[in-house]
Amino acid sequence: MTDFGGLFDVTAHGATAGASGDVSAALRDLAKTIPVSGGTMYFPPGDYAVAADLEIPRHVAMWFVNGARLVARAGATPTLLVRGAIQAGLHQIFGAGLTVRFVPPNITGANTRSALLSDVVPEWWGARGDGATDDTLALQSCIDACCGSPFEPFTTLPASGVVLPTTKGPPRWATARMRLGAGAVYRITQPLRVVSTEGFAITGAGMENSVIRAHGRPAARASGGSVSAIARAGAAWRTDELRDMWVCMTGGTGVGQSAKVARNTADSITFTKAVHVAPNATTMFVVLPEAVLDLDGCFEGSFDRFSVEGASEAGAYTGIYYHRNPELTARGSSSTNFAFVKVGGLTWEAAWQIGGLGDRYDNFQEDITEFLNCRARGAGGPGYTGPWYRNGWVFGTGTFANNLNHNVHGIDAVRYGYNVSVRATNVAIYGGTLQTAGQADIQIVNGLQGYFTVSGIRSEGSRAFLAYAYSPYNVFWSIRVADIEIDSPSLVPNANQCEAGGDVITTAAHYTDLSGIRVLNPPMVVKQSATSGTRTSITRAGAGWAPHRFAGWTWVATGGTGTGQTADVSDNTADMITFREPLATPPDATTQWDVFVRPLIRVTKDGAVLRVSGVAMAGGSIDKSLVVAEHASNVHATVEGFCEVAYAGATVTTMWPGPIVLAPPGAPAGASLSLGEFGARPAASLARAADGTVQVPGSVVVGAGAAARLGFFGAAPVPRPRVSGGSTADALRSLIDALAALGLIGDGTR
């Protein structure tokens, strides 16, 4: 084709298609011919072999029609340096063995980006995006091309122990943005690694429209093993092809254990760390890539509008892994944002893993992240018994690793053991939905320092909302939970604890602030009748209850003999419920009753400070809904505006206007009150003065064991008055009496 309009056909300038040729010299000479005002190299269909390094200058664009490719000549390992623009569709233009880069190897710093190459697509390296073809090499080649200098390829892992330039210096500067195709599902079998790179970006065509799906090795049965290795006879693995993947035991002996692969032979795998239970010939296991997207030393990155997921037969150990491996990068991951990114499918440890896994708690930074409308979608939940779907979001490691300052706006996490596990400091979650967690929506693990806040959340169907795991360090932690609605039909009783009920919120923080919390629909069995009863039990002949079902629940008499009495259930048989403590009046065949789990806020930290404001509990009175664990002491608490909501509906029946201030014995003189065991109620005039505030000259101890635990707050609330009367004068008198009874006015009319 004749040159015209700045378009130059490479075949007219000595470049001949053919895998055994070499077009390096022809293209180099053509680049010198094209005027500095700019021009385009046109490549007709065919493979153009390159045997030597080649640089295309900034003023030269390359146009590849479908079917045109630059490839490495057999036996050669050339590098193509592209400074100008590329015009190509979603088809392959670079062949295997050809290294592509967008800046010279000796240039680093903020001005290395290829301004004429805004987006780079993995299809240029042969990615199909059809969900069946293994696109790992194509996607990793695309990432490596965009990651700047020094040019470390991660299409294959470096040999163990090799020191790379990225481990010794500042991060590389990304040179272009990677764009995922619309409607594409990219199948991968190894993590996609972004290592020691600043400014790297991936964008897709939509959260459900661009997907990267990881496939591990499907379940297999071991032929034997030890605490440090597992074997499968006849596996025929290539030597070390499984290095840095994870063995996860899905059935048989050792089920639930996982271990990282140090090395492998044809039929055996050696772990980096020993497991607790040795696998044997009953053990079923999968081998999983450590992550779908591995962000190792990722600075100022940007990721938006795509999904990553684990395949259904064997997915990935984690979905997105944001961390630092000191063998590969000198820097930690920091200052990165994610928007409209979903992690779903089969993951073992976590969908989002922010910080090092159990094999390496690195003492460098994984911090300063921003998440906007990001999701974690699992398939566990309260009824799930398998070993997968452990965590939706994990922040930190429970140690101080400079892992801090993570902000999530519009979180979404569904069906994990813990939807969110907070092990870092300064984690803030604003708005969103947490659903059907098998253990709790949020787990707290104290690190060496910490502050956590969550607000504007709707929780549905989880076994608990917030649970404390352990606190290995006696350092100050504070948490704030605000503006939360919790629908709790799957709440699980704590029958193994001294206090009855299920814990919606358990805190071991030094300071806990709970405000604007509404808990609805605890598990219940309502409108039951009795055939007989005693002070310590009630019987309903033919009930057919599952034994031990109601252990830890609360029994309430709603009609007939003993109406209004409550009792904590110690156990039950098929037709009898046994109480922990005797009732005042024994029920009989006229007694109507309900049994349900009372939602509880539980404090388990010695010396904790608790502030509760504007909390509504369905079916929960203040004396049952707010307790301090038996082993905790010296708890200071303030309660303001506690609502008791009818457990059969949503009508507010009682409001505690507060504040009611509680402190341990020995506190300084002032408005303080310490209450002991259930039932130890002070006089109403002491617990509630005219303005709704405790008014006592000093600390008051009521009930046995008051120094050890807090049994309940305050006294019986003032009943809501009813104004009535047949005439205006009678109605006015009734209104004055009602207001005076509430302590709102002083009645001076008599």
Image (spheres, rainbow, N blue to C red):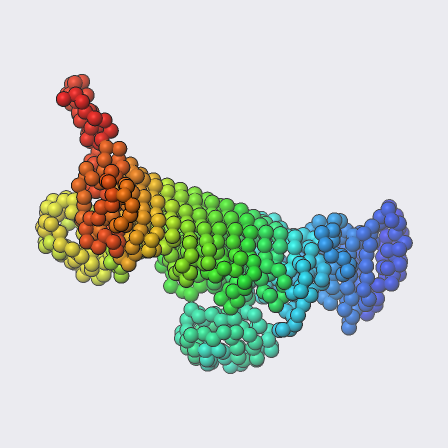
Depth check: 342 or 235 in front? 342
Residue 250, above or below 124: below
The residue drawn where x is 48% and y is 56% is 424
Most extreme residue toward the top is 728
The residue drawn where x is 43% and y is 43% is 456
State how many labels appear: 0
Q: Position of residue 578 (x, y in %)?
A: 16, 58
The residue drawn where x is 24% and y is 58% is 498
Q: Position of residue 158 (x, y in %)?
A: 65, 70
Q: Name the quadrant containing residue 745.
A: top left
Q: Name the quadrant containing residue 47.
A: bottom right
Question: Is residue 705 rendered to the left or right of residue 3?
Answer: left
Depth check: 337 or 685 in front? 685
Instruction: State which quarter of the image contains the C terminus.
Output: top left
Q: Position of residue 331 (x, y in %)?
A: 62, 60
Q: Is residue 583 visible?
A: yes
Residue 51, above or below 305: below
Q: Position of residue 183 (x, y in %)?
A: 60, 52
Residue 251, above or below 561: below
The residue drawn where x is 57% and y is 80% is 266
Question: Is residue 575 rendered to the left or right of residue 34?
Answer: left
Depth check: 123 or 351 in front? 351
Question: Is residue 592 rendered to the left or right of residue 496?
Answer: left
